Amino acid sequence: MPMRFLLLFSRQGKLRLQKWFTPLTDREKKKVIRDVMALVLARPPRSCNFLHWRDIKVVYKRYASLYFCTGLEDQDNELLTLEVLHRYVELLDKYFGNVCELDIIFNFEKAYYILDEFLMGGEVLETSKVAVSVSMENADTLQETMEEYMNRPAF
Amino acid sequence: MPAPIRLRELIRTIRTARTQAEEREMIQKECAAIRSSFREEDNTYRCRNVAKLLYMHMLGYPAHFGQLECLKLIASQKFTDKRIGYLGAMLLLDERQDVHLLMTNCIKNDLNHSTQYVQGLALCTLGCMGSSEMCRDLAGEVEKLLKTSNSYLRKKAALCAVHVIRKVPELMEMFLPATKNLLSEKNHGECELVPQLVRILKNLIMSGYSPEHDVSGISDPFLQVRILRLLRILGKSDDDSSEAMNDILAQVATNTETSKNVGNAILYETVLTIMDIKSESGLRVLAINILGRFLLNNDKNIRYVALTSLLKTVQTDHNAVQRHRSTIVDCLKDLDVSIKRRAMELSFALVNGNNIRGMMKELLYFLDSCDPEFKADCASGVFLAAEKYAPSKRWHIDTIMRVLTTAGSYVRDDSVPNLIQLITNSVEMHAYTVQRLYKALLDDISQQPLVQVASWCIGEYGDLLVSGQCEEEEPIQVTEDEVLDVLEGLLVSNLSAAVTRGYSLTAIMKLSTRFSGVNRIKKVVSIYGSSIDVELQQRAVEYNALFKKYDHMRANPNPNVAVITIHASNSTEADMTDFVFQAAVPKVSRPNPAQIIKCLCFEVLIHGFGLRMRIKLTYTLKGSPVQDLAEVNNFPPQSWQ
C-alpha cells in the first residue's frame, strides 16, 4: 500500500531529492535511480504518466524542469498518486513562493522537511495544506538565529 | 582554522564546475576540510558540515564518514542541529548498519521532549527507517503518544505505529486499546490511519463498524480513498459487510464529479473496491460501465487505468466486459504504447467463437501496422485464438498465411512445427495450402518461418501442386522444373538461414518420390554432398546413399515406404551438442530386415503389422550427457497401410 520511493530529478538526469520508504542498500538505491531515471527520461512527450518497471508501478509527472517520480505497489491507485505528487508541488510552491528548481537545489533540506510533514512511511500523513504550512513556519521559528546558535551550548 | 564555508556557498561553487573532473576536485577538497573539522570535534560547525556532506551525497559521492556526526547532531540541544541530524540519519544510515542502533537512546529522549516539533522529528525518523530492534525498544513510547491530546503528534504517532507493527507484528496487541479510541474520533487525521491499522486488526470487532461514515466532499480525496480502501478490506471476505456497503458504493459511483483527475481517482478506487468485495452483480456491472466510460475519456492516464482494471476483471466478469469490446478495439489505434499493449492483451482475452471473424480482422490490421515490439506477441495471440475458435479450416489457413506474410520474421520458432502439424491434419486443404504458400514464396523469400513452412509443404504435397488440383481457388499452372527452381533458389539465397536451407534440401529430396524428373534432384543432392555447411553436407550424403543403395525401392514409391520427418528443437537456454537420434523397428521374419539409420529424415520398411518404433535420443546439455528412450506406437494407420 505505501509508496516505495520518491525521486526528484532534472531533465539532464541530476538528482535533486531522494526519499526511500523501504530499506535498500546504497548500491540498490543507485540502481533504482539509474534505471527509473533512464525509463522516465526516455518517454515521449505525450505518453501517459504510468509505466511498469520490475514489479512496481512508476508514476511520474513533469513540472517545469523537474520530474517528480514515485514507485508504487501493484494494488495502489495511480490516479490518486498523481494527486499526491501535485499536492507536494503545491506545498513547495506555497512555502517558497513560486517555486523553481533552483529553490530546491539551494534549499534541499527544506524540501525534505516539507515532505516529512506531508508523508510518513510512504503514506499521506496530513491532508490539510494549511496545517503543513503552519508546522513548517513554527519549526522554522524554532531554528536558532546565527547569534543564538553560536551562544547556545550543544550538549 | 578559518570557518568552514557555508552550505549555499558550496553549492554555488560546485555548480560552477564545468567538467566532472573539476567537480570531483572541488568535492574532494571540501571533504578533506570537513574531515579535519570533524576530527577537531567542533560543535559549532558540525551542522554546517553535515549539511554540506548531504548535498555532496546527493550528487553521488560517498559520505559514510559523516554517519557518526549525524548521531552527535541528534544528541545536541539545538533544534537546528537536530533537524539536520535526523535528516542525515534518514539519508545516510539504514537499518542494515549497526551504527543506527546508537540512535535509539536519542530518539527515546526526543520522543519525550517538551517541544512537539522535536518529538515529531523523532517519530518521523522512527517511522521511516526504524529497524525491528529499534521498534521493539521504542514501541512503548510511541504507544504513549497515541494517547496524547495533541493531534499533530497523534497523527505522526499513529503512522509511526503502523511502521512498528509492520516491522514487529507481535506488537499489535499493544496498540489495540489506543487505536480503538482513535477510531471513535471524527478528526480527519486519525481516520486516514484506520485502513492500515484495520488490516492488522481485521479479526476484531470491525464487522460492527458502520460503513455509513461521514464521507467528506471532494476537498479531501485522500481521506475518501482511504475510507474506500478500508471498506474494501472489510468487505473482502465478508458477505454481510459487503451487502451493507452496496448502497454507499453505488452512491459514490454515481455522484462523484468526474471533470477532474481527482474525481476520477475516487471513482477508480470505488471500482477497485466493488470488484474486490462480495458485491452484487448489479454493482459489478456498474463498476465495469464506469471503466467503459473511462475508456472514452480524453485523459490517457484514465484510459490506461481502465484497460489495466478491465484486464484484471475480464475472467470473472467476461460478459460485462464484452459489451465494451468495440471501445477496447478502438484503443488499439491509440498513440500511446502502454495503452496499445493493454488493449491488445484485453482484445485477445475477449475473443470467442462468436466474434472471432470481426476481432481477427481488427487484430490482423493491428499486426500489420504495430511496432516491432508487439509483433511477436500479437502473432502468437492470433495463432492461439485461431486454433481455439477458427470457424473453418480454410479461414484458419488463410489467417495463418496472413500472419506469416505480414509478420513472418517475428513469429516464434516453435510456431513452425505447430503450423506444419496443423496443415498436415487439414487433409482436404493440402492442395489449397501448398498453392498459396508457393505463391507467397514467389513474392518474398526473406521471412524465414514462412519459407520454412512453405518448403516443407512443397516437399510434402508438391505432387498436388503440379497436378493443379486445387478446389478452393483457381489452380495455378506450374511445372516440376519451376518448383525445383524455387527450392534451389532458396538453397543459394543469402537471405536463407541455415535451418531454412535444411528444409529446402529435404523438400527437394522428398520430391524425388513425387516428381518424375529424378535426375535433376540427384544432381542437386550430390552437389551439396560437399557443402561447407556440415548439416547440409550430412543430409546430402545420406540422401545420396538413399539414391544409390535403395533405388530399387523407388519403383514402388509409396506402398512400403513411410517417410517420417522429425523436428527436434532445443528450447533450453544452453547449447545442446552431439545430438543423435536413433530409431529402430522390430525385426520380423521376412526377407527384408529392419533398418537402423542415423539421420534426421529416414525411411523405414514396414510389414503390415502396424508400425512400432523404438527411439533413442542422446545429446550433451551443459556438459553432461543425456539419454532418452521411448517407444512410439501411435502412428496413424494411413501411414503404413
Image (spheres, helix red, strand yellow):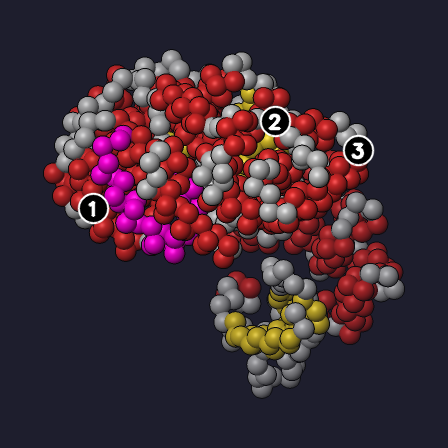
**Displayed quadrant of residue B568:** bottom right
Q: Which residues are drawn in magenta? A: B123-151
Q: What amino acid type should be assigned to the residue bearing mark 3?
A: Thr
In screen coordinates, is B62 left or right of B124? right
Q: What residue sits right under mark 3 in the picture?
A: B19
* Place of residue B186 in the rendered image (x, y in percent of width and height, measured from the top left): 19, 27
What secondary structure is the magenta-colored segment mainly?
helix
Say which element carries label 3.
Answer: loop
The total of numbered circles placed on residues is 3
Name the disc covering residue B176, or none: 1
**Displayed quadrant of residue A15:** top right
Q: Mark 3 lies on which chain?
A: B
Q: Is residue A90 magenta?
A: no
Instruction: Look at the picture and state if B421 lies above or below A45.
Output: below
Q: Which chain carries label 2?
A: A
Q: Can residue B556 be seen in this view?
A: no
Name the disc covering residue B105, or none: none
